[in-house]
Image (cartoon, rainbow, N blue to C red):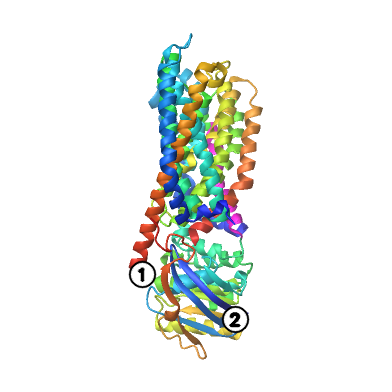
Amino acid sequence: MIGLLLRDLNLAVRAGGGFGLGLAFFLIFASLVPFGVGPETGVLRVIAPGILWLGALFACLLSLDRIFQLDWEDGSLDLLATSPLPLEGVAAIKALAHWITTGLPLVALAPVLGLLLNLPGPAFVWLVGSLAVGTPALSAIGTFGAALTVGIKRGGLLLSLLVLPLYVPTLIFGALTVARGAAGVDAMTPLAMLAGITLATLATLPFAAAAALRVNLR
Amino acid sequence: MSSLWEYANPRKFMSTSTTLLPWVSAIAGLCLVVGLVWGFFFTPDDFRQGSTVKIIYLHVPAAIMAINAWLMMLVASLVWVIRRHHVSALAAKAAAPVGMIFTLIALYTGAVWGQPMWGSWWEWDPRLTSFLILFLFYLGYIALWEAVDNPDSAADLTSVLCLVGSVFAIISRYALLFWNQGLHQGASLSLDAEENVADVFWYPLLICIAGFGFLFLALVLYRTQTEIRARRVKALIAQERMT
Amino acid sequence: MQLVVENLACARGAAQILSGVVFSVAAGDALILRGPNGAGKTTLLRTLAGLTPPLEGHIRTAPEAIAYAGHADGLKASLTVAENLSFWARVFGADDISDAVDAFDLNDFLDRKAGELSAGQKRRLSLARLLVTRRPVWCLDEPTVSLDTANVARFAAAVQAHLAGGGSAVIATHIDLGLPGARTLDITPFVAKRIRADDPFGDEAFR
């Protein structure tokens, strides 16, 4: 299992794209927002929590189809399925690798983008906290979507269509945590909800993803 | 020994549904005509909402069936996953576009009703928003059916999506309640029909709900028959090619 | 470890391809699968590997004993030869790749990226993976594609060594590997292309 994780991380770093792409997208997305809504700091301050969460969500989405597609194309997925590793474990490790290469850098970059968008001071802690707690759910849900669409040629668009509605609760509680943090009211409740969603998806979705993989491999 | 599962045989399903269809269609038509005419022309105007309230005869039944169609797909998916009955999988496939159109009707009539009531075509009320999300779920479900070539694999994958989607739909529903209360304190644009519907509105509404229910049943039976015939044609073509 | 297959029926997608496949391969034996293109050799091997569930029949060998190698090499272009092999060794719970490297003479390009190798070299690396799985039953689909004569001989030697060590192999191939004592099974008699028996839409007509 650890071997698979290390290999995936290694591949993400070496292939270039994987590691930096989501991060660059997040940066560009957040910097484009003021061009769309105008430079008034009052407006940006209000929408910053939502924009930052949306940016993180789309950055995650961008690299989802790579989770299984490359292994599917070169035959590694067949070999992994016949290996001693349980497919559920493979799916969980793939989600973890996706989170380390996409979610974790987003968590690190988010405060910088918060500055760009005039996020109020007390909200920074909540921004980092909610992203750290919530992005694993994005990876787990995305891995499930990627497993569903792995056999489909040019399934990227379909993947977004399937995954985005599933992202709704995570987005709501994530953005709400930051918005409440910015407003100085209790943000612990949505954060706890977010943690609940993350734990539930991590516990269950690898099984659903493995079921979908088995169907797609046969 | 006769059992429910006999109808999982396509041939048995075809003959039974062919017998049932005219009756179900007739009952649906009758209920809809009676319910809608009664509701539209023979009920008084609401003291507060005027005649606009009469859109509930389309809005409420469509909304109820939009959710029930998904529930039916969930049950049919479970039957497919557990017992591998092909008709069940095809019925789930057949129900999805019907459910999606019901969702669309509920959203559209909601907008038309909301305009004079709230002064805007769309409010991010939790209930409205959950229907929008339900619409997206239908869209993804149908798209996945279309994208997978092998029908058995498509049935398996869409079943898994339906199961996972159902759980997320419920979580979304409660997340939305939390979200809206969180941002708009005190905003209570409830669309709950039961709390302000008097008996004069209630009976025609019940008939309309029954009409929409039978309409759904008839459409699903028709569409399942079509799906079964399509599979039969596919099987014949495949047989032809192999011999 | 022996591989016993009883009355196996295999499907690819909605179509049944083979039925009534019966054979057994004892430890130390190799079985060469033959049959025209599209007969179902790949389908049979994928069924043996446990990727495709059989329609009927049984495979009396634990899936944990079977090592599968398909058409695709399963290599990562941006990893080196050594990294590719070590990864699979680790997945299969082995830590030593030197015998696999020696068997397919990969010593000269251990530190080259797999993406820079020629097709034949990639194939050798892909076959070397079989040795690190430490699994007794090899199910190989056209293993000699892109291999030159010298490397076919090297591959045959590796199979020989595997058999001598008590392993067994099922190999779909069109060329003569020169394996002494290997039996040949023509799968043509088992070809039964029709609608799957469990497909209720293929039986008698309905309105």
Tell whether B41 sits left or right of B3. left
Q: Mark 1 falls within which chain?
A: B
Magenta segment:
A86-111
Q: Which residue position is annotated with label 1?
A: B242
Toward the top, the furthest residue is B47
User: C74 or B182, which lies in front?
Assistant: B182
Which residue shows up at 37% across the image and 75% down it?
C37
Q: Mark 2 falls within which chain?
A: C
Q: Nearer the viewer, mark 1 or mark 2?
A: 1
Tell whether B239 sits left or right of C164. left
> Is label 2 in a helix, a strand or a loop?
loop
Tell whether B235 sits left or right of C179. left
Q: Is residue A95 magenta?
A: yes
Q: Is residue C72 magenta?
A: no
User: A6 or C42, which lies in front?
Assistant: C42
For the residue marked with disc 1, what is the amino acid?
Met
Asked if the residue at tag 2 contacts the one at tag 1, i.e. Cβ–Cβ closer than 8 Å, the answer is no
> Is label 1 in a helix, a strand or a loop?
helix
User: B10 or C177, which lies in front?
Assistant: B10
Image mark for residue C146 = none
Disc 2: CA contacts within 10 A as few (<14), some (14-19) or many (>=20): many
Residue B94: x and y, percent? 43, 45
Residue A123: x and y, percent? 59, 26
Label 1, label 2: how far apart the Cα atoms are = 37 Å
Image mark for residue C167 = 2
Question: Which secondary structure type mostly characterizes the magenta part of the structure?
Answer: helix
Which residue shows up at 38% across the image and 26% down it?
A35
Q: Is residue C45 above or below residue B122?
A: below
Residue B203: x and y, percent? 51, 22
Residue B196 visible in the snapshot: yes
